[in-house]
Each structure stands twice: as C-alpha cells, then as structure tokens.
Amino acid sequence: MKRVLVEKDSYYDSVFLMLINREVGQIEGVTDAVVSMGTDVNVTLLKETGLADKEIEGVTPNDLIVAVEGENEEVVDAAIAKAKELLDKKSSSDDGENYKPSSLEGALKVVPEANLAIISLPGEFASREVKKALHKGLHVMLFSDNVSVESEIELKTLAKEKGLLMMGPDCGTAIINGKPLCFANVVRPGDIGVVGASGTGLQEITCAIEKFGAGITQGIGTGGRDLKNARIGGTMMLMGIEALKNDDATKVIVVVSKPPADEVAVKVIDALRKTGKPSVIHFINMEPGEQEGNLYYAGNLEEAAGMAVALSKGEAYKKRTYTIDRTEIDAIIERETRNMSAKQKYIRGLYTGGTLADEALIMFDREIGGIYSNNQSREEFIPKDPNKSVEHTIVDLGDDVYTVGRPHPMIDPSTREDRIKIEAEDEEMAVMLLDIVLGYGSHPDPAGAILDSLKNAKKKAEERGGYLSIVTSITGTEGDFQSIHETKNKLESIGCVVMPSNYQASTLALEIMRKVEK
C-alpha cells in the first residue's frame, strides 16, 4: 500500500529530512519511504520508482513530500504519523534555551560578530538569502544546488564587488581559519593554502597534506561550476587565489578542479603565476604539464599534496606510485589473486565521493578502457539501469539518482550497503574498490556500517569457489572523531586491503585486474 502527503510551502533542510527519511524507513513493514523537498530531480525519481505520480503534480521545490509504501494500511499510517511527529518536533523545539534564529537578521542579533553564513535552501530561494548575507558583509558558503548559472554569476559578481567569498553553489567542503565546514576533516594548521572546485578532492588533498607532516592555512571551496562554466569564469577560484596571495601565512598554494573551460584555465594559471608563490595545479583528467617557474603540475590528488608539502619544506619532490615497499605490493597482488576463479574478471568501484570515483574511473578508462559509470562523459558507457553494473563498473553513489529521498552515502552508508549486497551475487566480480570518507558530516562509523555486507560478499565468493579482493582507502586524519586507526583495523580484520590514498588503492586494484586478465 502507498500513500503520499504533500505540505505546501513547508521548507526543511535537506540533511534534516535525510535523517527523518532514515528513521521512517526503518519502521517494520515499510518497504520504501521518501521524505524530501519537491525539487524537479526528486519529483522525476519518485515517478520513475512508482512511489508517487499524480499526487505530486504541481509541487514546487518549497513543498514537502512524504511518500510511503508499506505492507498494509496500518504500517503506512504509522510511518506517516512518525514523519509528522519528527517534523513537528523540529518546528516546536527551537525556542527557549534552544532558540535557533529563523532568519539571518535573527542570527546576527545572537552572534553579531559572525562574518560567514552557511546557506542551505531550495535553489530558487537561496539566491535571495545569499544577497542578504553579502549586503550585510558576510562571506557565504552556499551548500544548495539547483541554483541557475545566471544567479551564480550575479551572486559572485556582487561578492567580488564587496570583497567577499561566495563559495558555491553546491559547495560541500571548506576549512576556514582551521574550522571544518560541512563535509571536511580536522587538519593541522600550516603554510599551504588550498582552493578547490571539488569537495572530496579538497578533502583528499588536505588529508594527504596532514599525513605527509604539513598543514594548511585555508581550504576554500568554490562550487563545481566555477571553472567549468566559461561565463562564471573562475570568479571564486581567482578570488581564493588572490586571498592566499595576500596571506602572509600561506607559503604554498594548491588548486584542484575538474577540467576547466580552456579560457578559465588560462586565467587561473596566470593568476597563480602572478602570486610569485610556489603553486601546485591539479586539473582532474588533464595531463599534467611541465614545471614552469613557480608552477608545478600534479597528476593525481595525492601527488598534488606531496608536491605542496615538499615545496613547503624546501625539499625536492620524489615522484612515486606507492608509499609502501614494492615487495609488499607484489605480495599483496599474489595473495589477492591466488584463489580467484576463472570466471572472475571485472572491477566494481562503489564510491561515496564523486571526485574519488572520477580519479579511479579516469585511471581505469585510460589503462583498460570501456569502464561503465554514471560519471562517464561518453554516453555509451553510462549504464541504462543505474542499479545494475555492466562488466567493469565504477559508480558514484552520491549522484542524484541514488540520493532521492535518501541521505547522501557519506551520511548514511545504507545506499552502498544495498549495492554491495547486489554485487555480491555476481560471480564475475573479481575486485571491489571502495572509498571510506571520515570527518565532519560523515557517518560516525562508515566502515563498521558496511562491514557485515563486505564480509558476506567475501563469503559468497568463497562458496562459489573463488575469492573477492576488496581494496579500500580512507580519506581522513588523526583528528577526525571516527578514528582512522579503528576504521583501518575494522576493514583489515575481514581481509580488506587498506591503501594510504585513493590513487594508491586504484593503482593496486588496476594491477590486480591486470594479473587476473593474464
């Protein structure tokens, strides 16, 4: 039985709705549940999954949708009631000692010294609030997506005129003055400044800088379109570079982005050249250039961090594929392939971080070719069914198609857990490649949450007379509350190979696959 509830003009934060969705979905007898705002993407996916249809005609991004499917009417009634209870509790709890301002003006009365606002609203309303914040002299981190290019240009132009940062839209990671914002890690202070048009790319680089013994001044996010769209022109990237240029504490600059528009790349490189400071550039999926004056080009995320740390310490950078001894790598490859069956021949990458998925996808596409992925630029290699792998497949589970009505997999690992169970039934899978992302915003135990499903996948492979190699990396630091050591121990306790970075994990998985193919 299905039921749909629509509440007009009832906006709730997406992260809050994700938590409600999870709680409602865990009610016994509930087979599917979605608690979300009525964005175009959410409406389309609700219709495609059959959970709602005519009931959501005419909804807007500011309307709340609660859709439930259950075994019987009693279950559905209980689920709807639970959702209402949690929503009402949110509305009635923000008073007295727990007062939470409902407006920017109210917030500034409580914290008049604030100089940065984090904004997460439906795209059509976010722009208005960003303008208010900028006019009040606040830097802005705009978490919201579904903001038009025209609005982004307008907001960034206004921010530039006022000398303020407008990080976003769709900016999920920043570390400002040592404070991790949204999805970010605890990184020690240092003299390296990072500007990133890539959330998990920024996380991977800053965590690697920490692992290599250095630290950062700032980690400035820009939003994914900042460099990609020529009309936006890298406005925030250029402002971030200028800020780091003028910051005496910043000795080295790092920039990371997915492939920028050609004319924007020229602007960024020229701006870095003019800083006079050693600058490391990593444009994902672009061949690194040769060193030119103060400019250094990195071929992967970890290398970008390594180059920056070497420059910070005044040392020569030593390029290397692994930070583990080659003898140990060879032993791992031998161990991981020894008991595989003749039927096992495909890689399955199940990622929560989009940039990390891209890094693996690019590597495998170059070396093996024909990799299926929802992040593929070639349409013929985008799976027709996003929930079904085809041959070699690397999936970004944080994509909209997987998060409708569900928390992002970095918050709630159940999306990936479900996919692991599906992949475990495939006798042709040889290697499973995973990222584990720690830090603020992420699940309190991302490895522990999927441990049983990974263990079961290995068991199923053994029962079929084979062996499943699970290769992982952990994006995190010693300071993250989830404990990077406990996370590593949990994964290794069930036979997972844990590598120091996503690049090294992907490279090892590639070497394992090459041996399998022989």
Image: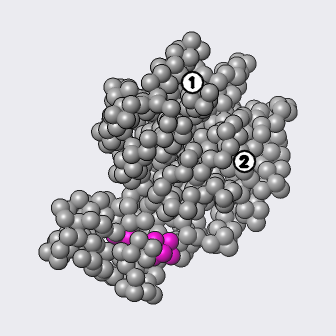
Tell me: residue 358, above or below residue 137: above
* Badge 1 amino acid: Phe
284 lies above or below 310: below
Foreground: 258 or 209?
A: 258
Q: Looking at the rendered structure, which numbered label has been put on residue 268?
A: none
Helix, strand or loop at label 1? It is loop
Of mark 2 and mark 1, the one earlier in the sequence is 1
Residue 108 in view (yes/no) = no
Q: Is residue 40 magenta?
A: yes
Residue positioned most to the top: 327
Query: Which span is picked out in magenta?
Result: 35-45
Name the mark nearer the viewer: 2 or 1: 1
Q: Residue at x 54, y 37 (%)?
A: 345
Q: Residues within 10 Å of mark 2 (few under 14, many from 20)?
A: some
x 68%, y 50%: residue: 258
> What x and y, as percent, mark residue 171?
55, 56
Observer-nearest of 74 and 202: 74
- Residue 492, given in percent of the width and then of the height, sits at 38, 26
User: Percent position (x, y) of residue 196?
Assistant: 63, 47
Which residue sits furthest right?
292
| Residue located beneath label 2 in the image | 242
Q: State the image coordinates of residue 512 (x, y, percent, origin top left).
A: 56, 28
Question: Is 514 situated above or below 41?
Answer: above
Quarter residue 75 falls in: bottom left
Q: Nearer the viewer, residue 188 or 88?
A: 88
Quarter holding the C terminus?
A: top right
| Quarter that holds the N terminus | bottom left
Q: Is residue 477 above or below residue 327?
A: below
Q: Which residue ends up furthest to the left in the rendered image?
A: 74
Q: What residue is rendered at 72% in x and 34% in y? A: 298
Which residue position holds label 1?
212
